[in-house]
Amino acid sequence: TLQITDLSTPESGTGAKAQFAEDVKNGLGQEAKKLSSRYFYDGEGSRLFQKIMHLPEYYLTRSEHEVFTTQQQTIAQKLAAQGYFHLIDLGAGDATKTRILLKQLLQQNADFDYVPVDISGDAITELYQELPTELPSLQTQAVVGDYFNALDWLDEHKPGRKVLLFLGSNIGNFNPDERQEFMQKVRKHMQPGDMLLKGMDLCKEPETILRAYNDAAGVTAAFNLNLLHRINRELGGDFIVDQFKHFPIYDPQHGVMKSFLISQQDQQVTIKATGQTFHFKAWEAIHTESSYKFTLELAETIGHENDFKIQQIFQDKNHYFADVLYIV
Ligand code: AVJ
């Protein structure tokens, strides 16, 4: 059976747009200009991210896929060892990696239901069309909405043991403060015995990391620049996108990959929805994304700080990527 609960409100469309305009206005109004990577994922951005996941340089997806195709038996056993649970997939997207786990869990006759959560109604609708034919015996309760609205809803309507998935190194887009807040909020929804399986990209040869965000085909550059196209499309901006270029840099001391858009000349940009004109000096930068990288020690510290223990760490052969299983 498959049910969808839509927690997005009727006015969340216009509300979301006002929020986007507000965030752009604040970000470009700062001394050090910035835009949030949250806004990369419109239709075009999501399509470009799919392409990124297939790039030879973007090792993250392949590494985590290797973890899921070589260690799925152990992972499934650990998750299912304590009986009935909700498998809650935060930011499920197209659930490529989760499907491997779902097949394994069904094969092992695990007692669970699947709760994909995504802010994108389109992603959830696609799962709705595919999962019943691919995995007919799977019990699914999909939720469209924000992670924490979804967790509130579950606590109220479907209590029970939780296993949370947060895959793909999505945690990397949070800065340390945001990451701490995320872990605390997640922890508040969890009880002893509940688990969190978190994908984390690991510190490695800096060149390897840098190449993953600076691919030869220029897909990541297009992904980054799409943010300006999106502002033009949705907020009535007049960015001449060709006058900006993608500039990625890896900071090996803080373990963070940062991406910028550089203004290649002195220019002005007017954005109707913000009612403002922004000035860019030649070679001025807009910070658009940080992707944090982790060590296993940091994974442990993050756990301890929030009252989680590490139950097991799953890694690919190269030790490029870790899926860390935390337990309360
Ligand atoms: C989806 C956040 C895991 O940071 O590696 C890919 C997004 N940005 N290439 C990442 C991304 C540029 C990706 N995450």
Image (cartoon, rainbow, N blue to C red):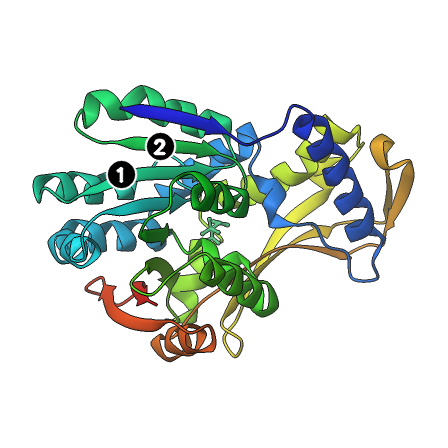
Can residue 299 be seen by looking at this rendering? yes
Left or right: 106, with 24 as reference point: left
Quadrant (top left/top right/bottom left/bottom right) for the N terminus: top left
Which quadrant of the figure has residue 239? top right
Exactly how many numbered labels are in the figure? Answer: 2
Residue drawn at the location 21% of the way across and 31% of the way down:
138
Q: Earlier in the sequence, mark 2 or mark 1?
A: 1
Q: Quadrant of the C terminus?
A: bottom left
Q: Is residue 180 above or below residue 168?
A: below
Under tag 2, what secondary structure?
strand
- Front in this rendered view, residue 179 or 161: 161
Question: What amino acid is at disc 2?
Answer: Gln
Q: Which residue appears at 39% of the width and 73% of the height? A: 299
- Residue 142 coordinates in the image, percent (x, y): 39, 32
Q: Which residue is mark 2?
A: 141
Q: Which residue is mark 1?
A: 113
